[in-house]
Image (cartoon, rainbow, N blue to C red):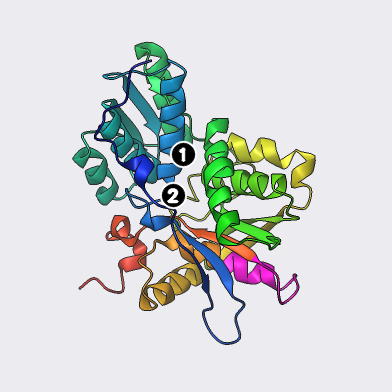
Amino acid sequence: MQKLPCHRYLHRVPPTPLVPIQINADSPAIWCKLEYLNPSGSTKDRIARHILEKAWRQGKLEAGNLVVEASSGSTSIALAMNCAQMGLRFLAFIPDTATNERALMIQAYGGEVRKVSGGMPEVIRTAATFCADEGAFLARQFENPDNAEAHQLFTAHEIMVQLPDVNIDAVVSGIGTGGTLVGLHQGFTHAGCQTRPVAAIPRCADGSMTSNVECCSLRFSKDVPGVIDGCSKLYSDWKQEPSASDLVEIAIDDDRCMKLTHQLWKMGFPVGPSSGLNLAAAMDAAQDLPTDATIVTVFPDRMERYFSHKVFETLRP
């Protein structure tokens, strides 16, 4: 096994903060993991590092190899950064609807971007075909168990250390790759917690949802990036397991996601719209739990990758 470059710093990054957030005096306090403080600006740093380092240890990757992923942005940004640290090449297949900020960030780390029309199912198929033809390493975020394992081994452990001696009553997350919700729930339950998993589902303000039968039989709004693009085999398979029998799926209007995101900005949290989604679902989940329940969610990414997104339209001239 080749040694990794000595200039790597990612293993020296401290745990992200976990803070209680209460939107107003009548709202429940929700414990929020500030994942936007990871080096590339999202929680995807965790899965990128774990997938690549594990493949490196197993001899599936070495310096100069090509890594490929189908990603709407955040995972590709994280993989591009990790590849830059590990001396790997990176190619991202992304939807042509992804914001330009994301493509620029991938390219800034030395990655290559190829845009694909037709939505995430087509992007995933295109990346898989390319890797089969070229023999490149495909990260497979939507089905790779190392995705959920990263959150089980590391994110959940951090939270348990930050919340010692309490039961985590519920964990809330939107469904992109499915890895965050699945991995955190597995980590908490393996540690002895009786934790209810809650999936946050965005929907259009008029109550309709954009149909996407390939996305775990769920339907997703078009305005919450990182969640609408979920085609997660991880999530759909996990839903069939006995451990997910108490899974709750909570639908949140797009407008409410945006409003809560703006409120978080005013409170000094530089987050993307999926954080508003997660917080809204966590607040709704609290209504069915005791008032002293411990509820955990994540703020997945930073606002900068959304400057051209709808969430910023009221601030643009």
| Residue at figure coordinates x 27%, y 61% from the top left | 307
Query: Mark 1: which secondary structure?
Result: helix
Residue 296 lies in what quarter of the image?
bottom right
Q: Decide which of 162, 280 is in the foreground and name it.
A: 162
Residue 86: x and y in percent read 30, 29
Q: From which residue to which does the magenta span run?
A: 280-294
Query: Mark 2: which secondary structure?
Result: loop
Location of the N terminus by quadrant is top left
Residue 262 lies in what quarter of the image?
bottom left
Query: Does the CB distance between marks 2 and 1 fall below 8 Å?
Result: yes
- Badge 2: residue crowd in 10 Å (few <14, some 14–19, many ≥20): many
The amino acid marked with disc number 2 is Thr
| Residue at figure coordinates x 45%, y 74% from the top left | 259
| Side (left or right) of 222 relative to 5 | right
Residue 42 shows in the view = yes
Location of the C terminus by quadrant is bottom left
Which mark is on residue 3? none
Residue 308: x and y in percent read 27, 59
Q: Decide which of 217, 83 is in the foreground and name it.
A: 83
Q: Which residue is mark 2?
A: 43
- Badge 1: residue crowd in 10 Å (few <14, some 14–19, many ≥20): many
Is 284 part of what is drawn in magenta? yes
The amino acid marked with disc number 1 is Ile
Which mark is on residue 47? 1
Residue 305: x and y in percent read 30, 55
Q: Please, is residue 298 above or below residue 84 in the view?
A: below
